[in-house]
Structure formats: C-alpha cells, structure tokens
Image (cartoon, grey):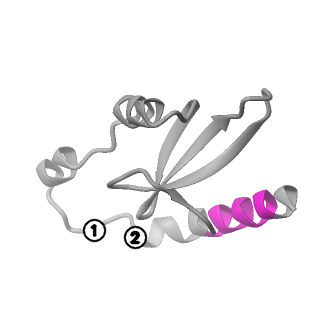
Amino acid sequence: MIKNTVIALVAAASLAGIAAPAFADTGVPQSIVAESAFDNATVIARLKDKGVTASAVEEWGDLVRAYVTLEDGAKTMRFFTNDTLTPVSL
C-alpha cells in the first residue's frame, strides 16, 4: 500500500515538473519572493519539536513534504500543512 502511494506521489510530482516551465514567470517582484522563502532548517526544527524526525523537507504546493525516519529505522515520506505542520492524509 505504501509503495503504491509513493509511486503515485512520484508520478504526480513528475507531472508537476513538466508543467513548471509554463509558470516560471509569475510577474511577482523578486523582493516579495525573497520574503516568503521556504526555510528548510526552520521547518525541520519545528517538526522535531512535534516529535517528527525529518531528514529533509520541501515545499510542495500548499503542503510540506518531509522525509521522515520512523522509530524502527524505516524511512518514509509524509505530508504536513504549511502553516501548522499538522499531518495530512492524501
């Protein structure tokens, strides 16, 4: 079940990557983009405060995609809301 979910998420991400060049010029001034930059280290620290051991995170639309190490040592990918970092079920 998890493998199927991961495969579906990777496929969706790949399709988003194909469409990305069409959205490259958003017309937003660079100063505004810089103010809203995604800070990986801060998000990893916030997840750690919530008890989530994330090795990497990235902005994924309105969500945060985190690569999480479980208690048994297994690694998985989890999604969280961007503002409160609550887990999201896809």
List x then y, in percent, for residue 69: 68, 32
List x then y, in percent, for residue 74: 80, 33
Q: Is residue 14 left or right of residue 35?
A: right
Say if 55 sits above or below 88 in the image. Answer: above
Magenta stretch, overall SS = helix
Q: Is residue 10 left or right of residue 68?
A: right
List x then y, in percent, for residue 23: 40, 70
Give the class, few, some or many, for how many residues have Cα within 10 Å of label 2's Cα (few <14, many ≥20).
Answer: few
Disc 1 marks a residue whose amino acid type is Thr
Q: Residues under labels 1 and 2: Cα distance?
A: 6 Å
Local SS, label 1: loop
Comparing 89 with 77, the one in front is 89
The residue to which callout 2 is attached is 23
Are the residues flagged by discs 1 and 2 in contact, CB closer than 8 Å? yes
Comparing 37 with 50, the one in front is 50
Answer whether residue 3 is magenta in the image.
no
Local SS, label 2: helix
Q: Is residue 66 left or right of residue 73?
A: left
Disc 2 marks a residue whose amino acid type is Phe
- Classify the position of the N terminus by image quarter: bottom right
Q: Which residues are magenta?
A: 5-15
The residue to which callout 1 is attached is 26
Say if 12 sits above or below 38 in the image. Answer: below
Say if 80 sits above or below 56 in the image. Answer: below
Comparing 89 with 42, the one in front is 89
Q: Name which quarter of the figure residue 2 lies in.
A: bottom right
Q: Determine the residue positioned at 41% across, 31% down.
A: 49
Q: Determine the residue positioned at 56% across, 55% down.
A: 79
Answer whether residue 7 is magenta in the image.
yes
